[in-house]
Image: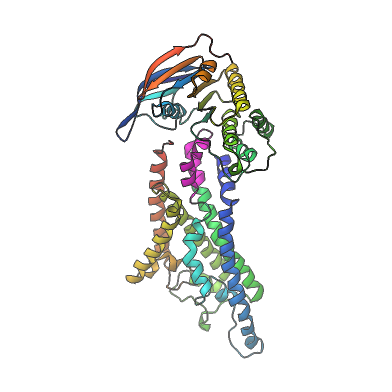
Amino acid sequence: MIRTLQFELNRALKNRSFSVSLLIGLGISISHVVLSVIPSVAQLDNYLLGKGEYPVSVFNKWIGGEAYSFQPELYFVLLPILCCIPYVDSLFVDRKTGYTKNIYIRTKKGYYYASKLLAVFISAGLVITIPLVLNLILAAAFLPSIIPESSSMTFPLFEASMWSEIFYAQPYLYICLYILVIFLFSGLISVIGLTVAFFVKTRFVALVIPFMGYILLDFVCAYTFLYKFSPKIFLRPNQPSPADFKVIATEFIVFALITAVIYYVKWKNDEAY
Amino acid sequence: MLIEIRNFTKIIKGTNVLSEVSVQFKGGRTYGLEGKNGSGKTMLMRAISGLIRPTMGAVVIDGAVIGKDISFPDSIGLLIENPSFISKYTGWKNLSILAAIQNNISAEDVRDSLYSVGLDPDDKRTYKKYSLGMKHRLGIACAFMENPDIILLDEPFNALDESGVVMVKDLIMKAKNRGAVIIMACHDKDEMTLIADEVYSIRDGKIDSHVVLEKGGTI
């Protein structure tokens, strides 16, 4: 199993699609630093001159903390596409070209499918979270990491927001936890795409369906005012609508279970013609 | 090594692609499968390799039932239809990563496999830049590289020039001499009768005839 996983991870992380997706993410992340973080450094002057304004900080300026700029919006809209680009279509390609035959005869079929799933999950998680972490580091290089104060009204989280007590006490811990949530959901979205590959006739459809589902779910949630059910909303660390951990966890478990069952049934009965 | 196919029937979308096929293949012998396109030769190879499951019947390898006791034969090399590799990797890298899964041969063995089919392991061209003949040679090298006990070859001489054909024949003989079962489907009857010890003729998914060649195995 370890060797099959190494084989799949190697393919997932050392391919052009992974690099392209990562570059797009890094492009958005760095452009945010250049166009939004660096210009805001000037706002520190008033604070340094003792004018009493609460200073702008990493926690409301990094890409996950800022509410109203273009790059965070773009990043979280494109998230399902960026996380599917690296490796989601590989199963489709392996099956279509007959490459699975080379693998099946050298390892257990279950090892191959489990390794494929893990590789897709990990590559998606990494490709989404690396640009976020880089943005955080760069933002921290330009702006102070002053502990947020809820009374300043300059930070995005309200008392009702998920983990607000962590944010206002240990903001970096909050960000780490949120990045973990983003990693898990990116992985899940990509695994949904992987499972879709069993049913479709072109690789493009496997890439697009998770994105369409993500946008459709957001549309339905917005229409019914159930914003907290939309991953497009709750995956943003600044919580445009207060998130609910129970909803996030339930949504993750339900989608993961459904996907796992379909994936298992499909690979178990898969034949290589 | 003994492969037993017991009343193997495969129905796909209402069509009997294999019908009550019962046959045995023994180690140290070369078997030829002949028949028209769509007669069931390739499907029989897929059945032996465990790539398809029977609608009825079973494939038994040394007493182990495929799909029940084992998912796939423990030691098998195959070239069924077109070879398939990762297009952006070189031939050497393609074989190396596949060999690393089982990890029972060395890097030197992989290089030797490539030499044995006339490919250069240091060739920097990626698989997608290979000619049709080179792709086929790589597929042959992949089938033989781990010295498997069962070797399935579907049209092994396709796209090969004269030197390639000689190389493949040599590989088949070496594998046979070390006790492997070799099963090949080939449209060229002359080549097949030269190499095979026994020939099965398949028609409409059934074994139509079986011939044991007295001088089989000599090239």
Q: Residue at x 45, y 21 (%)?
A: B33
Pick out the residue farthest to the bottom.
Answer: A51
Give the quarter of the image for residue A2: top right
The x and y percentages for residue A150 are 51, 79
To which quarter of the image does residue A6 belong? top right
Whether residue A237 is visible, yes or no, is no
Residue most extreme to the left = B14
Q: Residue A23: horizontal and vertical position, in percent?
A: 59, 62
Give residue A117's position: percent from left, percent from top. Answer: 49, 48
Question: Which residue is at 48% across, 60% downward?
Answer: A81
Where is residue A199 shown, x and y percent of the image? 38, 47
Magenta-colored stretch includes residue B163: no
Tell whether B17 sits left or right of B191.
left
Q: Please tell me which residue is depicted at 42% across the width and 54% down the height of the picture.
A: A205
Q: Looking at the image, which is closer to me, B4 or A99? A: A99
In the displayed structure, would residue A181 be above or below residue B151?
Answer: below
Q: Is residue B123 visible?
A: yes
B32 or A129, nearer to the observer: B32
* Residues in magenta, as a range: A88-116
Q: Is residue B102 above or below residue A249?
A: above
Tell me if residue A239 comes above or below residue A125 in the rendering: below
- The answer to which of A157 and B166 lies nearer the viewer is B166
